[in-house]
Image (cartoon, rainbow, N blue to C red):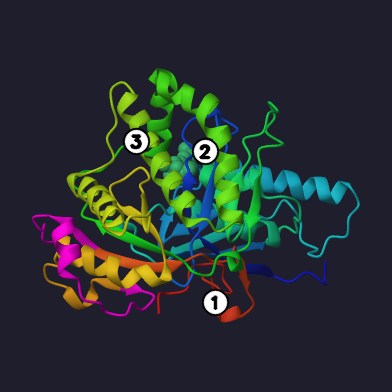
Amino acid sequence: MASEKPLVAVTCTAPVNIAVIKYWGKRDEDLVLPINSSLSVTLHQDQLKTTTTAAISKDFTEDRIWLNGREEDVGQPRLQACLREIRRLARKRRSAGEEDPLPLSLSYKVHIASVNNFPTAAGLASSAAGYACLAYALAQVYGVESDLSEVARRGSGSACRSLYGGFVEWQMGERADGKDSIARQVAPESHWPELRVLILVVSAEKKPMGSTAGMQTSVETSPLLRFRAESVVPARMAEMTRCVWERDFQGFGQLTMKDSNQFHATCLDTFPPISYLSDTSRRIVHLVHRFNAHHGQTKVAYTFDAGPNAVVFTLDDTVPEFVAAVRHCFPPESNGDKFLKGLPVRPAPLSDELRAALDVDPTPGGVKYIIATQVGPGPQTLDDPHAHLLGPDGLPKPAA
Ligand code: DP6
């Protein structure tokens, strides 16, 4: 067709999310359907994001993917599931007779390149941002406008929550085909401007078991997980939604910590047990509780995923004092000036009263660094063609 361009490329970015009501366990491994609903906060892309370019061309002979500059196996099942699903949605749209903005054949192969703006070595979960970004970019390149929860979810369950900004729930759904297992925004990123997020990057002592394998063993062996999914999470979802809507930090913080603790309790109830928290993680838990006890209220709240890093929620006026407390408990070893990344934090002294209340033997280097961030928006499309990670030949541009 003379009107066809040789290559159509779209570049998007997508955020990381952190669950405050955790997803752990699938009822259907293949369709990635969870045993309970979950709720997360979308983190700002100024600090943490994935950027993905998807390009289609009649000249491509096979689907290919590059992650952080390295070509990866495009045959991995979850990636294949995303590609199959997006092409199915595109075919459905075309057969429904809807106008197709891109006159490119659906049979064309796709090239995908994806990079993170944060080091994978930090142990921060990147699969949620990665698969949300992939779903979002593929949808545009193939002209799909329907709900993308299923596409992202097939890559990684938690990825469907990264399709929206602000506060997001993933409704577990009831149907066996998963059509009602979708992500929905609970409140936009502008809803709670004072909320801040501090990621305490902890030196990983050992490589933890991945989420997929971990939750599979938990579903098979943990009676506590079943109890959690059936009898605890439904009420917590409603309560967390209320806390978010009312900007009730006390309630939000306490429930966030309780849900993180219950998730890690189910890991310990798994057989053989799974342990994601390190000694430093546990020291952070104690620090947070002592900090709150000193103030007589919940001023900071931790949550931990399948690894030792802590994500701490607080309000903007508490950040300087809490960062001073972290510095006191975990004195930076060599990189004092690089200890704090992300949003600027005003230096604050640690009062003698708080120092005494913390009552700790400092652990130098326990926390490698802190990333200060806030609630952020969902995926974005970059209009600037210079942003493309793939050149006109469909191959990754050399890193600048
Ligand atoms: C502890 O979404 O990584 O972060 O669906 O198997 O890819 P898969 O698992 P994944 O699990 C995330 C688990 C968690 C809690 C959460 O994000 O809700």
Which residue is the extreme one toward the right?
Answer: 97
- Picture coordinates of residue 97 (x, y %)? 91, 52
Instruction: Say if residue 218 shows up in the picture.
Output: yes
Is the residue marked by circle 3 packed among few (<14), some (14-19), or many (20+) residues within 10 Å? some
347 is higher (above) or lower (below) than 44: below
State yes or no: residue 384 in magenta.
no
Q: CA distance from mark 3 to mark 1?
A: 40 Å
Which residue is the extreme one toward the left?
Answer: 361
- Picture coordinates of residue 50 (x, y %)? 48, 63
Q: Main secondary structure of the magenta part?
A: loop
Residue 250 as seen in the image, left or right of residue 103: left
Q: Name the image quarter holding the C terminus.
A: bottom left
Q: CA distance from mark 2 to mark 3?
A: 28 Å
Is the residue marked by circle 2 packed among few (<14), some (14-19), or many (20+) residues within 10 Å? few
- Of tags 2 and 3, the one toward the viewer is 3
Quadrant of the rendered image containing residue 120: bottom left
Mark linked to residue 264: 3
- The disc labelled 1 sits on which kind of residue? Ala
Residue beneath disc 1: 387
Q: Nearer the viewer, residue 25 or 262?
A: 262
Is the residue marked by circle 1 packed among few (<14), some (14-19), or many (20+) residues within 10 Å? some
